[in-house]
Image (cartoon, rainbow, N blue to C red):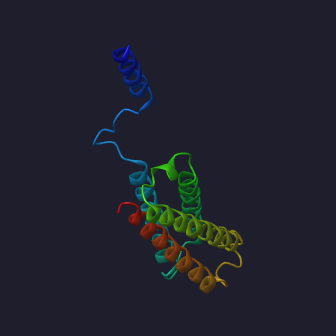
Amino acid sequence: MRHLTLAATTLVFTLTTAPPARADEPTAIDQLMAAAQIVHADAVEVRQMLGTRGVNLVAVLQQVDVLQARTGALIAAMAAPGVADAMRTPAQAAALERARVAAGIMQALIASKARILAAVDSAPANRQTLRDKAAGVAGRAALVDAQMAQLRD
């Protein structure tokens, strides 16, 4: 009887545990870190585009649309079921929460910049405002990226 109970417990445990992750498969943390790095690179690119003379505002608007989509995807990935469970320490959970807050602020800044750029007629007059917002977005993206790096620790 004892042997049968042990066998049943082993079977239930085997069926309810996930298979071990392969070494070459990225974890949820790896995926979040990669997404944050891409968003950061996109934000820096927009900031650099706005810093040049004779900037093509249509190209900037297209890049802002890409940045906005990737930021939304990053925010959704941070809120996905199971991500909070992947955090092994309170420090990781706190870093994830700080990254969520910074990404939310970044998304609001991007939306504001997109509205200014959409009014192409007034966009050249608001160039300094656009540069400031781009710097703010890049700063928030760097903060999100840094918080994601803390998840690895």
Return the x and y of residue 4 as percentages of the image width and height. Answer: 37, 14
In the image, taking residue 122 as reference, residue 134 lies left or right, namely: left
User: In this picture, is 59 found above or below 25?
Assistant: below
User: In this picture, is 111 found above or below 84?
Assistant: below
> Which quadrant would the C terminus be assigned to in this image?
bottom left
Q: Residue at x 53, y 68 (%)?
A: 98
Closer to us: 29 or 112: 29
Q: How many marks?
A: 0
Return the x and y of residue 59 as percentages of the image width and height. Answer: 55, 66
In the image, taking residue 59 as reference, residue 4 lies left or right, namely: left
> Which quadrant would the N terminus be assigned to in this image?
top left
Return the x and y of residue 79 as percentages of the image width and height. Answer: 58, 53
Q: Residue at x 49, y 49 (%)?
A: 85
Dividing the picture into quadrants, the one containing residue 114 is bottom right
Dividing the picture into quadrants, the one containing residue 136 is bottom right
Q: Residue at x 56, y 48 (%)?
A: 80
Q: Residue at x 67, y 85 (%)?
A: 125
- Extreme left residue here? 23
In the image, taking residue 120 as reference, residue 57 lies left or right, namely: left
Closer to us: 120 or 83: 83
- Extreme front residue here? 1
Return the x and y of residue 123 as percentages of the image width and height. Answer: 66, 78
Closer to us: 25 or 120: 25
